[in-house]
Image (tube, grey):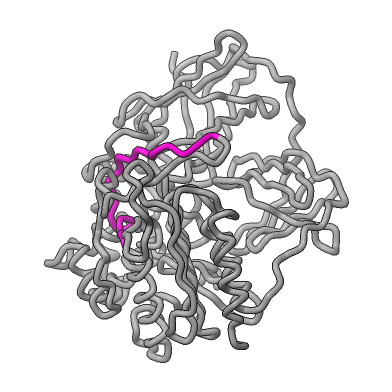
Amino acid sequence: MATIDGKQLEAEMDTLPARFQGPGGVAAVISRGQLVARRAWGFSDLDEQRPMTPDTRLPICSISKQFTCAAVLAVCQQPEVLDERLAAHLPSFEGPLPSVRDLCNNQSGLRDYWALTVLHGGRAEQTFARTDAAEAFVRMRTGHFPPGTRYSYNNGNFRILADLLESVSPEPLEALYARHIWQPAGMAGAVLTADTRYPEDGVVGYEGNDASGYLPAQNGIYWRGDAGISASLDDMIAYERWIDATRDDPDSLYQRIATPQTFRDGNAAAYGFGLQHFRVGDFAFTGHGGALRGFRAYRLSSTQARLSVVVMFNHHGDAHAAANRLLRTALGLPHPVPQRLRENWAGQWISAETGLLARLEPGYDKVGLRFGTSAEALTETPDGGLASETVRIVREGEDLLMQRPHENFAERLAPVASPAPVADASIAGRYRSPELDADIVIECRDGGTYLWAEGFLGKGRPEIVHPAGPDLWIVATRRSMDAPAPGDWTLHILRDAAGCVTGATLGCWLARRINYVKCP
């Protein structure tokens, strides 16, 4: 790797507050174990005018997953040691259970429990107690794909992992983090703040944007294993320096969790043990993001390039994009130049495997793909397709061929004609899910269609239901307990031979194909 241009990197740092607007943030670049750039700006609390500093502790959210996996390896050596204990946490599960390694690699096939809180009647601001997680897991009967065959992000994998780890260790999770990672790495300020109602150092996370203003985000969830760690920028710098210092030791915890994983069919997996694997330029990197309402974070590192980047915001700015800009600057790589789209890509298609709609929404230089939790930005390729780091799309007649190698997924999607924007009163009523032991209610009124859920967490807020095709609807969840919210749900209405509604299938990328029966 060439020497970093310090002036250019500092100039890129200077752009972060304006490019990623919000109350405050921190960022750092570490090269060859040495700090080469560090910045803190803005406020950790606007009302108290408390400045953001390098020692302000922020929730690192899902970046915690790699710490949980490292603790598992430190205590158990291999995740298979815990396999026999998994059934007790999924007592209602009817199919083949995943392995604990599948949990570590997000290959379990289990539906994400934070997405399911929406269907259990949860509201964004309500308290989700520690015991509520077990209530969600005990209701799980099936997965949305066979274990080990696909990748699907699932916070619940790591929540169960933490519970399994604590079942074999006399020490709680936070003590295991401290003994095996925080203390060796010199992360003096790192703590487990599992209850999001009480953030460390009085830091406030903000929802909103420059146009609407910034309002304090209200969180009420309790999480551990899947998230929960709070750390300062200086703590994260110490972590990155520890990774560099142990880079040549194959028995070091980070090198062990960074070992590439595979699917059951032998195909390479781009995710394993709480880390994403990807390449930038000539170098392989590992990294992970984190999100909670009001906070965004991203870290990445390469033992090949001996380079790490950390970015954390107390707002909803794109921490991944900010980290990527710093990374490319440090590597001396140019930033992509926008190129106007050559073709019209607008349309929608249906995935038979997942039951989800895929919608393409063209902009000036990018096409937004709505299939996962949030829109994925694709650019045109020289051969006439669309691509991003994780998705490739080509047209085959009217069909769409979507390839998502990191998920071990490829499928030909069939086109779906857009419907007239009118309500269909025949779909109104109550529907019951045996899978979840919960209901959804669809109401048609005043020309609009609305859906809410009722379950062990209460009665959810009504969500707007948009027609998307013949007996296909989009239910958009933009706010939920976890962040980002599940996004778009595809609702497929089922009818008998006489055309009467008998049930529905509802799913999103994080929780697919949940069956409902219409109640009399």
Query: What segment carries the magenta color?
Result: 212-231
Q: Position of residue 226 (x, y in %)?
A: 34, 56
Task: Determine the image quadrant of residue 461.
Answer: top left
* Rendered-image quadrant of the N terminus: bottom right
| Total number of numbered discs in the rendering | 0
Give the left or right position of residue 367, taking residue 202 as reference.
right
Q: Of all residues shown, which one is farthest toward the front? A: 49
Give the left or right position of residue 218, taking residue 207 as reference.
left
| Nearest the eye: 137 or 154 | 154
Residue 182 position (above or below residue 63): below
| Nearest the eye: 125 or 55 | 55
Tell me which residue sits at (50%, 34%) in the image: 477
Residue 348 position (above or below residue 29): above
Q: Position of residue 519 (x, y in %)?
A: 44, 17
228 in the magenta segment: yes
Query: Can residue 366 be seen from the camera position used here?
Result: yes
Tell me which residue sits at (55%, 30%) in the image: 475
502 in the magenta segment: no
Q: Main secondary structure of the magenta part?
A: loop
Residue 324 position (above or below residue 295): below
* Rendered-image quadrant of the C terminus: top left
Q: Position of residue 246 (x, y in %)?
A: 37, 87
Q: Of all residues shown, which one is farthest toward the top? A: 446
Residue 184 position (above or below residue 163): below
Tell me which residue sits at (53%, 56%) in the image: 17
| Nearest the eye: 116 or 397 | 116
Query: Can residue 498 be seen from the camera position used here?
Result: no
Task: Determine the image quadrant of residue 493.
Answer: top right
